[in-house]
Image (cartoon, rainbow, N blue to C red):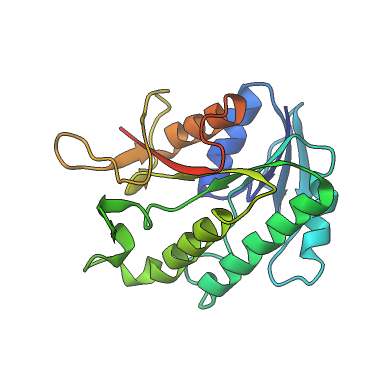
Amino acid sequence: MNIVLIGATGYVGRALLQEALQRGHRVTAVARDTSSLQAHDGLTAKPASIDGEATASATVAELSRGHDAVIASYNAGGWKNPNVGRDTVAGYTRIVEGLKQAGVPRLLVVGGAGSLEIAPGQQVLDQPGFPAEYRDGAEAMRTVLNTLREEKSLDWSFLSPAAHLVPGERSGRYRVGGDQLLVDDKGESSISVQDYAVALIDELEQPAHSRKRFTVAY
């Protein structure tokens, strides 16, 4: 497939890029700075930013036109950005608008775990002790998810990781859930970033969660 990967140099983006290229997909990798990306036959690097840019929707449209899907692993300047919440929501609004302009029907979003439920009506984000430094970003991704749920024209999927998305190895195994946080028999919730990438590229190749959020964990 011909795909666009927004945020290709980030923590999750690099794992997604590697997984997609290993499977033979052609990837247009978008990031503010693409100089760290190694050359690959299936890779086209496109340095670009959608942070606070009035023309960002047009940029996304130009980059994605003619592609089969866009994977968005967008990070609005990092967790330390004091406006990360506002900027993240604005960035995803531009991405959605750009896809519509380009006529690209499919969007896969690297979501967060904060909006997963630990009990009916009780989300991880709203529990006591949720790390304050991640709150704005987590609330923003919850807003992005709720906005997508009202989206009628795009075929979107939103993949929330386990509570702990950690460096590790690619095992190719994972469990799939819906809106509830997945935990193992020890009460732990984790997945490697490599297996998260496997799950998202699996969804790209064999769609099973059209206009839905899903989650993966061990």
Rendered image quadrant of residue 218: top left
Seen from the viewer's position, the closer of residues 160 and 131 is 160
Instruction: Find residue 201 and report its horizontal and vertical position in percent.
Output: 56, 31
The residue shown at (63%, 51%) is 7
Rendered image quadrant of residue 59: bottom right
* Residue 158 visible (yes or no): yes
The residue shown at (14%, 38%) is 186
Q: Quadrant of the image for the N terminus?
A: top right
Seen from the viewer's position, the closer of residues 37 and 45 is 45
Q: Is residue 188 left or right of residue 31?
A: left
The residue shown at (51%, 78%) is 82
* Residue 47 visible (yes or no): no
Seen from the viewer's position, the closer of residues 38 and 197 is 197
Answer above or below: position of 180 versus 129.
Answer: above
The residue shown at (21%, 42%) is 188
Instruction: Find residue 140 and report its horizontal and vertical position in percent.
Output: 49, 66
